[in-house]
Each structure stands twice: as structure tokens, then as C-alpha cells.
Amino acid sequence: MSDLMYHSEDGQLKVIQGRPKESSTKELSSWKKFVRFILPWLGKKRELGDRFLAAKVINEEANAFKTYAEGMVQLATAKKIAQETTAMENQKLAAITQISFTPADIDAKMAEIEEKMKLLSIVHGGSVTVQSNKDLVVKNIETQEGN
Amino acid sequence: MTKLKELIETGSIDIERLANDIGISLEHLQSWITGTEEPKDIDEEEALWHALSLQTTLKNDLTNSSFGHLGLWIKDKVIIDPIQVAKVPVTPKYWGGDNFQLYQTNLNDKNQLQFIIDQGDASNEAIADILSDLSILYRMKGGSGINFETTGILSLANNE
């Protein structure tokens, strides 16, 4: 099989859902714009897409884990990441003094994220990919099987 | 007159901003629009694709069939609008080519994104660093930040 499948030691992918922190009408509008913005931007990171093509992706949520213990370890790790994310964001927010941001600020942040993603990919063999919902994976499997 | 030109004239697209976002001169962009020139490489195509995605006023035109009449080469690449193109299967080249069809569904109802994380040998902190930056990016674009919740584990099957 393609070595594309085995960037990570266990071949497992953690799925973390992101929602806006608030739910006002104004927030929903901002979120929609952000989704339209981020999907093409992160979606173009094709590595995971290629890997989907190279390998079947199994949704183990319904299919049970390889072993219960392995699954629980993975899930616990994913939860730690989510918790760590919140803590890290709070630290970063505390260090930000600006109250408004220019397009240049946003571009700089995007460049910073891209650099971190490159590092993740090149040094650690990992990736972060965004999709709109689970159907993306499922549809891809259907497409592969149909070909 | 291309549809893109119409959109520019009606103010749906700020052409100066578009050129600035792409990083080319206004004259250069106009040559693309009129068809006298085309992007010279994938980087320029990608820059245009990205710049258009930032112009949210395009959303209605990006998603109706007339977008295909823009006369540009981007029609098969740009259309990733989860709200407007709910029923349209698209094939963004960056998702792996013709066999990988990205079906956007109605995000209006879901209001969620899913982040698929292949951790590799990176630390939890390294992943959290990226996710927290994405949340801050959302704040910088006027949002309230992103709540991240674990929803499951996927596995790439071993066919050996």
C-alpha cells in the first residue's frame, strides 16, 4: 500500500468539531463568511484528500475501535487537544492588545498558520484538514467504491 | 462582455481589491478578464481562487449557473460555497482530482466545521497551537471564536 497511509503511527485521525462560540444572528453571519473563507483555504491542503484516495477511510465511531482500549486512548488524546486548544487560545488572547485588525494582520495570521501546518506536515508527518461535515468522508468512500 | 465584467460594473466585485488580493496589477487582472492573457502558473490561479473566495459579495454569483459563463478558467475550482451550492457536486482539484467529489451539504442547518487531525508524531500542544490560531483568525474576522469538541476517531484502513 501507499506509504501515504501511514504518516501517523497508528493511522488514526481525530475528528474535532468546531462551532462558533456565540449563536446570535450577527454571529451566524460571521460564521457563514468564515466557513466560506476557510473551506477553500484549508481544503486546498490536498494531502489528506490524496490519502483518502489512496486508502479506504473507515468511520470507526459506528464500527467500534480496533480495540476498546486503543479507541479510548485516541479519544482521550483528542479531548486533551480540544482542552489544550481552549487554554492556549486564552493565553494568546491575553497577549493581544489590538482591538481591530487590518487585512494585513489577517494575512500575517494566515501565513503564520500555514507555516505551522507546513511544519506539522514536513516534520511530524501530520495534517489538519477541514470539512463541512462527515458526509465528505462518506461520499468519498462511495465514490471510490463506485469507480 | 463577460459575466465577471458585469459583476465588476455592478459593484459586486471590487476589482482593485481583487487585484490587490491576488498581488498583481490592475492592468494585469483586466487582461485576464478580457481574455487576452491567462494566469501563467498554478500559483497565479490559486491566488485568484483565493482572492475571489474572500469577496463574499460574490456568493450569489459564485453559485448560480451563470458563474460558469464568466469566461474564466476558475469555474471548476472556485465554487466552494457550502450554503449556496448545496445540490451541486463540485470537484476542487486540490481535493485530489476527478475521483474525489466534494459534496457540500447545507451548512445552514449544521453550522459546524470538522477538523480532521492526523497528528503524526506531533505533540498535543502543536495541534492545539494550530487550532487555537484558527479560532483567533475567526475572531480577527469578526467572529466570537471557535468551540472545539471531540466527535470521534477515523481510521485509514490497513489493506495489508
Image (cartoon, coloured by chain):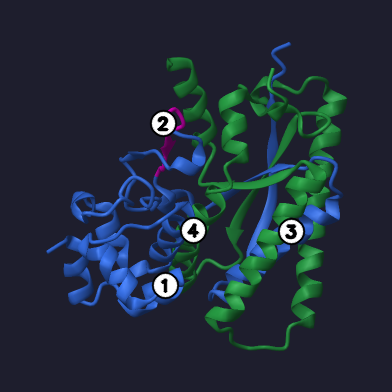
Chain colours: A green, B blue
Residue B141 percent location from the top left of the image: 54, 74
Measure the C-alpha gap from mark 4 to mark 3. 20 Å
> How many residues crowd around disc 2 within 10 Å: few (fewer than 14), some, or many (20 or more)?
few
The amino acid type of the residue labelled 3 equals Lys
Q: Chain letter for mark 2, please.
A: B
**B19 or B104: which is nearer to us?**
B19
> How many residues crowd around disc 4 within 10 Å: few (fewer than 14), some, or many (20 or more)?
many
Residue at which label 2 appears = B98
The amino acid type of the residue labelled 1 equals Ile
Residue at which label 1 appears = B24
Q: Secondary structure at mark 4?
A: helix
Location of residue B4 with respect to A94 vertically, above or below: above
Query: Is residue B145 in sight in this rendering?
Result: no
Question: Of discs 2 and 4, which sits in the foreground?
Answer: 2
Residue at which label 4 appears = A35
Residue A101 percent location from the top left of the image: 58, 84
Measure the C-alpha gap from mark 1 to mark 3. 26 Å
Residue under disc 1 on the same chain as residue under disc 2: yes
Residue B98 percent location from the top left of the image: 41, 31
Q: Residue at x 27, y 67 (%)?
A: B31
Location of residue A37 with respect to A76 vertically, above or below: below
The amino acid type of the residue labelled 4 equals Val
Location of residue B59 with respect to A122 vertically, above or below: below
**A17 or B102: which is nearer to us?**
B102
